[in-house]
Image (cartoon, grey):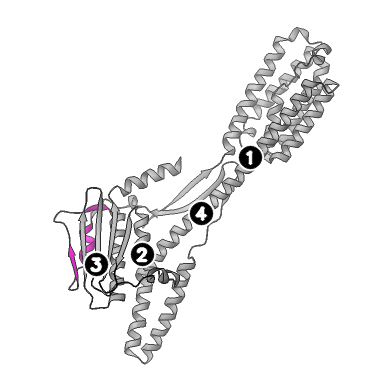
């Protein structure tokens, strides 16, 4: 059956890069506006004009560079900071001395903070500390003395850039942790699915060969013993993990990417509603009675198949633990919001604590073939057993399974 690959992209950096791109354009226009309002006070306005020509050309030409981490290279960061520092150091040559003494803005003004923030987003708080320190030195040289307003601005840029750099580092670590958790969850679901399939096929055959070989004796007994050993080994492998955890692929431009194998894609082929009765009918025989409604019991194809497989697993447990002569009854109830299937037998029942012991030994029939299937369908499986009075397994599947699954898929995309 076709399977679809679910790809989820997670990145808290991408919005920061987009915000930085807009910030650079807006602060460029702001710096030009400041210069225009005080143009008549510049002693060498041609220096300011030449610098703003370079600033506008550089800002607009490098917008793609500041859009993501992959394009924002070290060479670009160095050139960007150099333009900011050059503008600060050119301010005394272009502007009037009294404006500088009074704390007037530098030529790049707050555009400089964009260069420092790029360092913070790209390299974390250490890169931010380096860039903000260079800007602080340039501002002190431009002013000529450590005035209060200059120190205030320097400390503000220094603290803000380091804080943003630290937050980015924490966000990256959180992304990696989340990506790893999602991969482990996806691998666990796939392992359980394969374990159910193996339990319903290979393990059942090996167990039958072991029993028949012991009864026949001779060479068949040796074959049965080997089949038993393989059954134990396979159960151990299933309980320990069949599927290796996939790798986290990390793209700095787009964030962490998690690739996980999703459930079978029923929409790829004929996957309309299926009458559950047609899937349960083959289980009816001389020792298994089937009671069902007179009207069709429709479920989505995938849900119907999984529910029928869970019923089959319950009947296998009856034959294995209650004996070949045990009788079983299957009751199908079509409720308004869910379908309830009950499997009851007249066997000796399950001793207290036996299920926990079986899971510890790697016998996962109830845990995976029954409860695991129902959990994946959004339903539940309840097992009631009284020693000497048989066992009853109640399976419930909601009819809106596909709607819930679609809603969960939309939530994952968001």
| Rendered image: mark on residue 183 | 4
Residue count near mark 1 (Cα–Cα under 10 Å), binned few <14, some 14–19, many ≥20 = many
In the image, farthest residue toward the bottom: 218
Q: Residue at x 65, y 42 (%)?
A: 169
Looking at the rendered structure, the secondary structure element under dot 2 is: helix
Where's residue 130, x and y in %?
76, 36
Looking at the rendered structure, the secondary structure element under dot 4 is: helix
Q: Answer left or right for 336 relative to 251.
A: left
The answer to the question of whether label 1 and label 3 lie on touching residues, with beta carbons closer than 8 A, is no
Looking at the rendered structure, the secondary structure element under dot 1 is: helix
Q: CA distance from mark 1 to mark 2?
A: 44 Å
Where's residue 128, x and y in %?
72, 36
On screen, residue 230 above or below 296 = below
Q: Answer left or right for 120 relative to 12.
A: right
Mark before the other along the chain sequence, 3 or 4: 4
Task: Give the residue at mark 1.
Answer: 168
On screen, residue 398 above or below 17 = below
Mark before the other along the chain sequence, 1 or 2: 1
Task: Give the residue at mark 2.
Answer: 369
In the image, farthest residue toward the left: 294
On screen, residue 215 above or below 291 = below
Q: CA distance from mark 2 to mark 3?
A: 17 Å
Mark before the other along the chain sequence, 4 or 2: 4
Task: Give the residue at mark 3.
Answer: 344
Magenta stretch contains residue 255? no
**Number of numbered callouts drawn:** 4
Q: CA distance from mark 4 to mark 1?
A: 22 Å
């Amino acid at each position: 059956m076709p399977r679809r690959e679910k790809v989820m992209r997670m990145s808290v950096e991408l919005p920061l890069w987009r915000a930085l791109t807009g910030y650079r354009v807006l602060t460029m226009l702001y710096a030009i506006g400041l210069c225009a309002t005080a143009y008549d006070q510049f002693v060498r306005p041609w220096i300011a004009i030449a610098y703003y020509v370079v600033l506008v050309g550089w800002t607009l030409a490098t917008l793609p560079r500041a859009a993501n981490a992959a394009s924002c290279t070290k060479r670009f960061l160095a050139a960007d900071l150099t333009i900011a520092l050059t503008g600060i150091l050119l301010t005394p040559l272009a502007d009037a001395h009294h404006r500088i003494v009074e704390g007037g803005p530098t030529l790049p003004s707050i555009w400089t903070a964009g260069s420092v923030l790029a360092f913070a987003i790209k390299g974390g708080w250490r890169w931010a500390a380096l860039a903000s320190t260079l800007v602080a030195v340039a501002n002190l040289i431009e002013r000529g003395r450590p005035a209060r307003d200059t120190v205030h601005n320097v400390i503000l840029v220094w603290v803000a850039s380091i804080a943003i750099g630290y937050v980015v580092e924490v966000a990256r670590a959180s992304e990696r942790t989340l990506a790893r958790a999602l991969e482990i969850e996806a691998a666990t679901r796939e392992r359980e699915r394969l374990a159910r399939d193996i339990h319903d096929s290979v393990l059942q055959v090996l167990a039958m060969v072991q029993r028949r070989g012991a009864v026949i004796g001779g060479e068949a007994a040796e074959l049965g013993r080997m089949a038993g050993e393989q059954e134990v080994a396979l159960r151990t492998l299933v309980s320990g993990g069949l599927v290796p955890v996939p790798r986290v692929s990390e793209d700095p431009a787009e964030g962490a990417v998690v690739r996980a194998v999703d459930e079978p894609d029923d929409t790829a082929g004929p996957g309309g509603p299926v009458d559950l009765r047609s899937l349960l009918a083959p289980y009816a025989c001389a020792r298994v009675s089937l009671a069902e409604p007179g009207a069709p019991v429709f479920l989505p194809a995938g849900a119907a198949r999984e529910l029928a497989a869970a019923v089959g697993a319950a009947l296998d447990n009856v034959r294995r633990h209650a004996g070949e002569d045990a009788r079983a009854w299957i009751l199908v109830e079509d409720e308004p919001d869910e379908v309830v299937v009950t499997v009851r037998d007249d066997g000796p029942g399950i001793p207290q604590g036996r299920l926990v012991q079986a899971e510890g030994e790697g016998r996962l029939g109830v845990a995976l073939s029954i409860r695991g299937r129902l959990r994946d369908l959004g339903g539940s499986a309840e097992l009631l057993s009284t020693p000497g009075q048989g066992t009853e397994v109640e399976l419930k599947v909601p009819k809106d399974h596909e709607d819930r699954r679609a809603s969960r898929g939309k939530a994952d995309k968001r």
